């Protein structure tokens, strides 16, 4: 195993109906809360009204900031920072999916940050910039109420942000943006439409699969944990698509999504090369985050399965339950990858670039973006083994 440090201070309140605790939990954080949610929030307006009432009943004032769209923009975050400052909010609540939670985190940090908010994002911190280009070190306390089981943002120190002007998508990575509390209520996810349910499942799987196939080999506990997340998602997304009101399935999907990326499954590792490619699909072509991963994952595996055969053999037998009787290693590996593509197709997640209107002509620009934002000083994308421009072209061509 690699050496690692682990820190996760988020208190989780989990269970059906637990959104009723929103007021009590908010009152522990401050006296005036900025409530962050979607610009287009009609589909959760009743929930927002209820949460606002619960909070006010505990003596906490509220200010609405309903301006978040998918893939939150740093310009929108600046508006939230301005409003929170003007209204003297002392805590931030997020009600929504990953975009809302990430926006809330960026706003909470942005209120306490001097200078250009884009300087908070990770890829700007290569040591070559000015002194004021640094991660945030302070943020308002936050309460997260996720309505989508995918990004795990409710229990981690990451906030993914986009910059339309620069056509970049990056992320803040700082301990100060750990939320104080997450209320995870599976009932809030039962109205998710099938495509979003499928894309959320793909995102959750990617958060552990990236580490499983791209990182260190000798960490059995992590691998069992990652396999548990992947199997739980596969079993339960099928149930949730069959019966959207299946609360057990929704609960399992939500807890899996939280645990996938709260640090437990990858001490010592942090490479997410598939996400780096997915972010470019989102930044340049507006592709849903989970959809970008469901497109990249099978193509990535088809490209690299022979570089890490032990990892892919394990994936085939322990995650996809490939029957190895009478088959060669190569056949087992190939079948595992092929079954995984089939699984994604079976839940209705896109697996081809054509489904999101990306063509061969777009590939160079996508790779240029990955190189600019995510390549290391060695001119490669970090993972095990590292990936070159040519490798990425092979992946994207397999996804066409
Ligand atoms: Fe993700």
Image: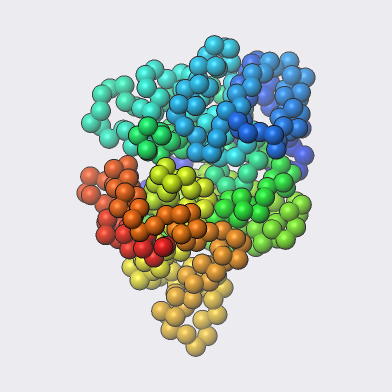
Visible residue check, residue 155 = no
The quarter holding residue 68 reads: top right
Looking at the rendering, in which quadrant would you find the N terminus? bottom left
From the viewer's perspective, is residue 177 above or below residue 248? above
- Residue 133 position, x and y percent, is 32, 25
The quarter holding residue 17 reads: top right
Residue that lies at the very extreme toward the bottom in this rendered image: 326
Which residue does the image show at 67% across and 50% down from the upper left? 193
- Residue 306 position, x and y percent, is 35, 71
Visible residue check, residue 54 = yes
| Residue 372 relative to residue 135: left or right | left
Query: Looking at this view, is 12 or 22 the one in front?
Result: 22
| Residue 45 relative to residue 231: left or right | right
The quarter holding residue 242 reads: bottom right
Query: Looking at this view, is 254 or 225 the one in front?
Result: 254
From the viewer's perspective, is residue 76 above or below residue 281? above
- Residue 121 position, x and y percent, is 38, 32
Give the image's coloring scheme: rainbow
């Amino acid at each position: 195993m690699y050496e690692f440090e682990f820190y996760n201070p988020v208190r989780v309140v989990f269970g059906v109906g637990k959104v009723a605790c929103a007021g009590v939990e908010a009152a522990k954080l401050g006296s005036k809360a900025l409530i962050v949610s979607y610009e287009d929030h009609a589909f959760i307006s009743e929930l927002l009204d209820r949460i606002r009432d619960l909070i006010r009943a505990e003596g906490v004032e509220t200010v609405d900031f309903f301006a978040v769209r998918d893939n939150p923009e740093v310009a929108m975050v600046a508006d939230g920072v301005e409003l929170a400052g003007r209204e003297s909010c002392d805590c931030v609540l997020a009600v929504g999916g990953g975009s809302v939670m990430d926006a809330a985190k960026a706003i909470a940090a942005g209120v306490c940050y001097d200078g250009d908010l884009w300087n908070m994002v990770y890829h700007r911190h290569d040591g070559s910039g000015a002194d004021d280009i640094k991660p945030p070190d302070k943020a308002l306390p936050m309460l997260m109420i996720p309505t989508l089981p995918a990004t795990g943002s409710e229990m981690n120190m990451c906030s993914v942000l986009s910059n339309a002007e620069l056509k970049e998508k990056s992320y803040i990575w700082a301990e100060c943006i750990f939320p104080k509390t997450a209320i995870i209520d599976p009932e809030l996810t039962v109205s998710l439409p099938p495509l979003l349910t499928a894309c959320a499942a793909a995102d959750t799987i990617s958060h552990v699969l990236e580490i499983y196939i791209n990182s260190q080999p000798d960490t059995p506990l992590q691998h069992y944990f990652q396999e548990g997340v992947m199997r739980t998602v596969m079993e339960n997304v099928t149930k949730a698509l069959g019966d959207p009101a299946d609360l057990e399935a929704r609960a399992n999907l939500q807890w899996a999504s939280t645990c996938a990326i709260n640090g437990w499954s990858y001490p010592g590792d942090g490479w997410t090369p598939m996400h780096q490619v997915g972010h470019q699909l989102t930044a340049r072509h507006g592709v849903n985050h989970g959809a970008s991963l469901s497109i990249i994952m099978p193509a990535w595996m088809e490209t690299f399965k022979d570089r890490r055969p032990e990892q892919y053999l394990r994936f085939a037998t322990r995650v996809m339950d490939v029957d190895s009787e009478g088959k060669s290693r190569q056949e087992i590996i190939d079948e595992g990858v092929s079954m995984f593509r089939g699984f994604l197709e079976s839940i209705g997640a896109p697996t081809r670039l054509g489904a999101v209107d990306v063509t061969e002509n777009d590939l160079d620009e996508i790779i240029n973006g990955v190189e600019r934002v995510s390549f290391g000083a060695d001119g490669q994308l970090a993972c095990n083994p590292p990936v070159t421009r040519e490798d990425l072209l092979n992946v994207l061509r397999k996804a066409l």
